[in-house]
Amino acid sequence: MFGMDYLSRQARKWIRDRERRSLEGTMLDLPLELQKDIGWPAPQSPRSLGGLGREHRSPHIW
């Protein structure tokens, strides 16, 4: 059953990553003042993001 274990781990990882990206996108859409009020880290400079789109940005290292 090695194949099923591997597939279930990959599915759980995919779901977890998708939920994390969704939450990060929601948080990044909030005004900066509100992000600061709730303690969300300040966005990184566009230069340090390497030109990635919003869906790939992460203020956290997961």
Image (cartoon, grey):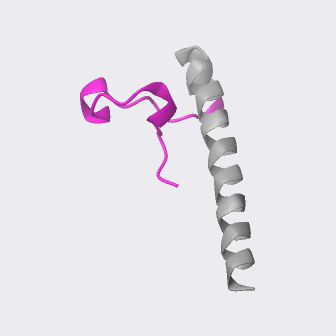
Name the residue at 65% across, 30% down. Answer: 38
Query: Is 37 situated left or right of 59 in this image?
Result: right
Above or below: residue 9 compared with residue 27: below
Q: How many marks?
A: 0
Mostly what secondary structure, the magenta segment? loop
Q: Quadrant of residue 9?
A: bottom right
Q: Nearer the viewer, residue 54 or 10?
A: 10
Name the residue at 30% across, 28% down. Answer: 51
Above or below: residue 21 compared with residue 53: below
The answer to whether residue 55 is magenta is: yes
Query: Is 58 situated left or right of 7 in this image?
Result: left
Quadrant showing the N terminus: bottom right
Query: Is 53 situated left or right of 39 in this image?
Result: left
Residue at far bottom of view = 1
Question: What is the span of residues highlighted in magenta in the rendered image?
Answer: 38-62
Image coordinates of residue 8 in percent, x first then y, are 74, 68
Q: Quadrant of residue 5?
A: bottom right
Q: Nearer the viewer, residue 3 or 10?
A: 3
Image coordinates of residue 3 in percent, x first then y, are 68, 78
Name the residue at 49% across, 46% down. Answer: 60
Residue at far left of view = 47
Image coordinates of residue 44 in percent, x first then y, are 36, 31
Q: Quadrant of residue 46?
A: top left
The answer to whether residue 47 is magenta is: yes
Above or below: residue 19 compared with residue 16: above
Image coordinates of residue 42 in percent, x first then y, are 45, 30
